[in-house]
Image (tube, rainbow, N blue to C red):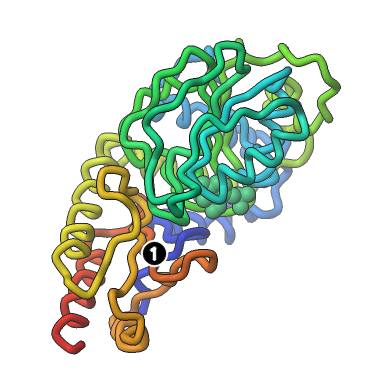
Amino acid sequence: MKKHNFSAGPSILPQEVFEKTASAVLDFNGMGLSILEISHRSAAFLSVIEQARALTLELAGLNHDYEVLLLHGGASTQFLSVAYNLLNKKAAYINTGTWSDKAIKEAQAFGEVVVVASSKADGYRYIPKTFSVPKDADYLHITTNNTIYGTQYQTIPDTQVPLVADMSSDIFSRTLDYSKFSLIYAGAQKNLGASGVAMVIVKKDILGKVHRHIPSILDYQNQIKNESMFNTPATFAVYVNLLTLQWIKEQGGLQGMETKNQAKKTLLYTEVDRNPLIKGYAQKEDRSWMNVVFNLTDENMTSLFDDLCKQANISGIKGHRSIGGYRASIYNAMPIESVKVLVEVMQEFERKA
Ligand code: PLP
């Protein structure tokens, strides 16, 4: 029996994606070959990667001022690629968690990094709202959803400088004006498919302005020229990415995702706030729709809560090792039925404690 998978990533994928993937692993498009064994230069695979890139732009509502890249190395490689390609002298960063902090550390090797706001002193429980970005900064970098602490930007800040975002854990989960961003990146393993590929959406006019040598594989302009095929792409992960994007479109696109995600997060946070034995981690106005982070008010009750989760077939709910507690990741593919099961477990926990 399939579990209710609340894992933070790699995480739950839509059932339809599994079924199509399984079939393509055995025989892709009736070719008599597996998706795992066809050349990245074959017409069949070129069609896969082209469709994935086009559908990404379509879902984001962006035009051809932007390019989509599907690259190796996860979001973590983008921490340095962004700086390599965009940071001439100075860049501004907002520190809202471990992943922002890692991005900041990578960028420091390339120039002056101004951390214009940080919620670190308060355990990253909120999203800073007031900050001032130096006019001469090459870009402002934000992390739209903070996977570990369960905070998320509810509104995207306005800036005079190009806006760069790590959207690894909330990409395509809601409607947004994507044209506010000059560059977006995301590891695929939460809302975009399987691990092994990172998606980058970049506005072409911000490129070509730095004066350093950029290693070919990290050079966005080189990757654009080579259509993400400077070397062998992660063909399997790109295929799963395409299936996941198609599924999002079938669900009504980003508006469809937003409606479903709103219902799920409302259901879960309502119980977190009602239940006297459970306490949410993040400040209410900044709560993530994707990662619901909470603690038990009495840690001695941990084994009872864990047992109830296990009996209900719930998996992957343990908090990140750095802050402990619990984290229920309710990404796009998570059905509301599984969220209902977790809410029932929380209620049973209250009755039995
Ligand atoms: N950024 C965010 C917001 C994340 O949640 C993660 C991983 O969970 C990363 C970056 C790192 O991603 P990767 O493992 O693809 O390098």
- In the displayed structure, 277 sits above or below 78; it is below
What's the residue at 57%, 37% (across, down)? 199
Q: Is residue 29 visible?
A: no
- In the displayed structure, 212 sits above or below 15; it is above
Q: Is residue 9 left or right of residue 252?
A: right
Q: Is residue 179 left or right of residue 308?
A: right
What's the residue at 70%, 22% (across, down)? 87
What's the residue at 27%, 37% (across, down)? 252
Q: Name the quadrant containing residue 229.
A: top right
Q: Name the quadrant containing residue 90.
A: top right
**Residue 168, position in %: x, y?**
50, 44
Q: Amino acid at mark 1?
A: Arg
Q: Quadrant of the N terminus?
A: bottom left
Number of numbered discs on residues: 1
**Residue 177, position in %: x, y?**
36, 23
Q: Is the CB–ligand 1 distance for label 1 below 8 Å?
A: no
Q: Is residue 280 visible?
A: yes
User: Could you tell me which secondary element the residue under label 1 belongs to?
Assistant: strand
Q: Which residue is denoted by mark 1 in the rendering?
A: 327
Of the pair 12 and 353, the residue shown nearer to us = 353
